[in-house]
Image (tube, rainbow, N blue to C red):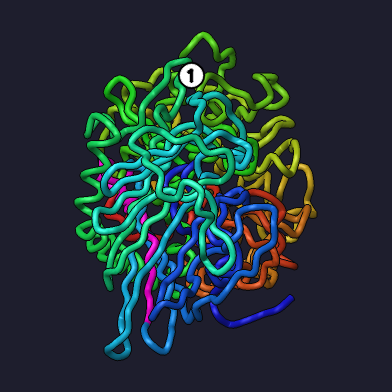
Amino acid sequence: MKKTTKFRPTAIPLVANDPYFSIWSFTDKLTDDHTRHWTGMLQSMFGFITIDGKKYRFMGKTAVTDRYFPEGNALEQTDVTVNPMSTVYTFTHPACELRVTFLTPLLLDRPEVFSRPVSYIFYDITPREEGHTFSVYFDAASYLCGDGACVKEIDCFQKEGHVWMGNHEQKPLNRSGDNVRIDWGYLHLVHPNANLGVLNNRISEFTVHPWRSDADLTQPVKFYTVPLLRATSEKLSDVFVLAYDDIKSIQYFHRDIDAYYKTVYGDFDTMLKAAVAEAYELRAACDKFDRELIKKMKKVSPEYAKLGALAYRQTVAAHKLCEIDGKMMFFSKENFSNGCMATLDVTYPSIPLYLIYNPELVRGMMRPIFDYAKSEAWPHPFAPHDCGQYPLCNGQVYGNNELKYQMPVEECGNAILTVAAATRADGDRSLADENREILQAWADYLVEYGYNPENQLCTDDFAGHLAQNCNLSIKAIVALGAFGQLFGEEKYTAIAKDMAARWKLDAKKQDGNGWRLTFDRDDTWSMKYNMVWDRLLGLGLFGEDVAREEISVYAEKMNEYGVPLDCRATYTKLDWMAWTTVMADVPEYTKAVYKSMTNMTRDSLDRVPMTDWYDTVNARQIGFQARSVLGGLFINLLLNHPKFDT
């Protein structure tokens, strides 16, 4: 395993808007491979700069066919910096320096902006001396709008400053799944300053196949290979705007729903004009946000800031924002797990970021769960795991409602804690009060079944069913305390306090060093990450002494790449490991945890968008990537939030 001291992301976000419009570089150098969808499938973007008539690649590889072609000259890449909303590459040449910035303006407090399916590719050329000529070329292949685009019939269109393409046969929302890409809608490339067009293919030395390269596309032209939207600019500084019109975004209990931005702009074209006009204004706003967020995270540790910058776009882009019947809905996709959407135990770990910047998005995550749970389609007295498989939110697919696949204690606790946290964050009680009856039913379920859970799954379902789960018991206890606090119900507060007192005794290891994985096995341990809400909500159920003793156990168990989830295996969950750093103030433990995570990103052989499930001994990915749960990394910043200041 080759090691370096420099922070190296396992994959680098380029375009990161939503689960379908999400393009990454899986290599250290942008010219070492094609760009790819977060799933790893080819979604080729390509760029070169012409300097005094000679072409140099700065992004991607030339051939998008099965034939081999020499790749030609690559510009020397000298730096890459990942910020929360942008990735900046620096390239050098004796005649100039080239900086290329990939920006997605995911400003969470401006949903009319971050819901736009638009990303920007800025470039800036700094000549080293006078007398040189420059031009920049960019293209995007039809793989971005067709899952297996090389065998699809692609229609291409063009008007002044604007080209776009999509499948000839449009079937919006025609399927669901996990390892799939969109095959409906239209990819758009816009820039009024650039020379735009459509090409049939690029080949060796950055020349192009002449067929239809100058075709009149005022009417759609059908391509049968891999057409490319392309643009060329001769300015020293410019921007290419890449956008995706998915036509319809989500099916919500058999209703086809638009993306949120259409409630603001009315249609895609109006939105796109606004996005193009605001490119430089948004660049400045995002730069300011990035600087401020990184500064806050550096106060925890430099490693924490690097991880947060890498995680930000990933967690937001694993969602789709819609508005249904006047209410915001923020749908997650369970990337590389099973493709479920509106998954409650994916929402729960993700919420810290959204509690900080826009708690309405947390309420938007919960509304599908409540709508489904209150419908006749949901047969159980506990909260559902999910509401469908992305993008079809038509009812749970997880085990087809079979009881053995459900997570009764887990999801009831998740629902109550998520609503309590969102209400605490901004004081808006609307969601809590509208759903008090069902929340109380779930609290009553926890009173009866939560303290010593029966054999069942929890959010860590990859570890299998487990009975008498002590961490799951904590979730039930803390959720009951949160319910009592939220609604002023002393009965539930008293029950939670009684349960917590019993738990300290019943789960205690006989050697006095921490608490068990399960009530019935003394020679066990586990991360008690659910305890974090006892502190953040100020419930006072377990106390700092319990949290500190647990953290001392985790510090002893830490491997080079982190703390294992529990005693059964050497793998960990990155989000839960982050949560343990907030259970109590132990700065040296916090710094060690985030250093171990950066060690993993540096050394892992698995070049994928940041995984949250990996082995702490060898840094190898076990599963999962590009998931929304990395919103949980931002939990340390809640300690400085005025509503969570403990």
Relative to 607, residue 140 above or below: above
Look at the picture and state if 389 lies above or below 529: above
- Counting from the top left corner in percent of width and height, residue 54 is at 45, 78
Image point (55%, 42%), residue name: 500
Residue 199 versus residue 517: which sits nearer the camera?
199
Considering depth in this image, is 398 or 572 the residue closer to the camera? 398
Q: Residue 565, percent across and down?
A: 67, 55
- The N terminus lies in which quarter of the figure? bottom right
Magenta-drawn segment: 97-114
Q: Amino acid at mark 1?
A: Tyr
Measuring from the top left, give residue 338's x and y in whole percent.
64, 36
Q: Is residue 646 visible?
A: no
Q: Is residue 156 left or right of residue 381?
A: left
Q: Residue at x 43, y 39 (%)?
A: 156
Q: Is residue 319 left or right of residue 607?
A: left
Q: Is residue 324 visible?
A: yes
In this view, the residue in front, 386 or 534, is: 386
Q: Going by the image, does 268 lie left or right of 87? A: left
**Residue carrying label 1:** 372
